[in-house]
Image (tube, rainbow, N blue to C red):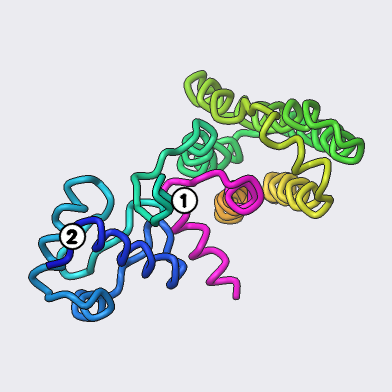
């Protein structure tokens, strides 16, 4: 009978081969049992153990979903362990869930003077990006969203936006200084948001804000190895799968 370590190694290898990420569904039970050369009863017992450890999640009628990442253990074998997310990943998840709603709420009350201030902030952001001043970039991003949130006249939403958008620039220093395309992607997102505000387009501002945040998440996931929650990883894959 296969040991638990052997089963973990087999499953980890399958996850790597199929390029599965947290939030992805594992192969169907019959197929997975065949790939691992074990009985379906053995597989079910093994998956129950993994679910108890928080490594997978089984949805009745849907399948079993990965809730872990692949790591190399001390002995050189592959293993699966629960994801550990940085505070930045949690901050971006909160931004994805809350910021589009805040911006939509602002859209209904923002006035011309406030839009002008957002425009001025965007100009300052462009200058910071051009000069590769990472601290100024983080400051102008904070100012951009804070100014928009002020139009809600809701202190709770304003404070929430401030918390979400108060970025530590350290993780972005190398990215912004070495990759011009990344800087252009971020600035383009701000331009699109500003345009949606001017047009009072509620549907567009939600979609654009969601895309803007997912771009941040994708950049950090791809270029800085920041592990994202399964919810965000799934949204990233869906967003760019739909695009293709």
Picture coordinates of residue 30, whole percent (x, y): 19, 80
Q: Quadrant of the C terminus?
A: bottom right
Q: Residue at 12% across / 65% down in the picture?
A: 44
Q: Position of residue 36 (x, y in %)?
A: 25, 74
197 vs 164: above or below: below
The span shown in magenta is 215-244
- In magenta stretch: residue 208: no
- Nearer to the camera, 61 or 71: 71
Would you say 31 lies left or right of 155 here? left
Q: Main secondary structure of the magenta part?
A: helix
Residue under pointer 2: 3
For residue 1, above or below residue 30:
above
Query: Which residue is identified by label 1?
Result: 232
Eye-nearest disc, 1 or 2: 2
Q: Can the viewer see residue 200 in this picture?
A: no
> Is residue 53 left or right of 71 when viewed as pictured?
left
The numbered mark, 1 or 2, whose residue comes first in the sequence reads 2
Q: Is residue 73 visible?
A: yes
Mark 2 neighbour class, 10 Å CA radius: few under 14, some 14 to 19, many 20 or more: few
Which residue is most to the front? 75
x, y percent for residue 205: 61, 50
User: Who's the residue at 43% across and 53% down the image?
Assistant: 76
The N terminus, quarter of image: bottom left
User: Quick one: SS at disc 2?
Assistant: loop
Q: Position of residue 67 (x, y in %)?
A: 33, 52
């Amino acid at each position: 009978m296969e040991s638990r370590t052997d089963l973990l190694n087999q499953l980890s290898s399958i996850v790597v081969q199929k390029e599965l990420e947290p939030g992805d569904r594992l192969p169907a039970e019959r197929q997975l049992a065949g790939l691992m050369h074990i009985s379906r009863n053995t597989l079910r017992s093994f998956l129950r153990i993994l679910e108890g450890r928080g490594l997978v999640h089984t949805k009745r009628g849907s399948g079993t979903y990965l809730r872990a990442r692949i790591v190399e253990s001390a002995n050189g074998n592959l293993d699966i362990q629960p994801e550990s997310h940085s505070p930045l990943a949690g901050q971006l998840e909160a931004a994805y869930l809350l910021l589009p709603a805040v911006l939509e709420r602002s859209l209904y009350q923002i006035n011309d003077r406030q839009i002008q201030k957002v425009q001025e902030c965007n100009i300052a952001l462009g200058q910071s990006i051009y000069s590769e001043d990472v601290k100024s970039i983080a400051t102008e991003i904070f100012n951009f969203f804070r100014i928009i949130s002020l139009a809600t006249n809701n202190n709770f939403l304003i404070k929430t936006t401030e918390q979400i958008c108060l970025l530590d620039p350290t993780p972005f220093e190398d990215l912004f200084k070495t990759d011009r395309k990344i800087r252009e992607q971020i600035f383009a997102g701000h331009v699109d948001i500003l345009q949606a505000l001017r047009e009072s387009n509620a549907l567009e501002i939600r979609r654009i804000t969601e895309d803007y945040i997912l771009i941040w998440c994708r950049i950090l996931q791809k270029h800085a190895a920041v592990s994202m929650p399964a919810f965000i990883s799934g949204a990233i894959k869906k967003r760019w799968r739909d695009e293709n």
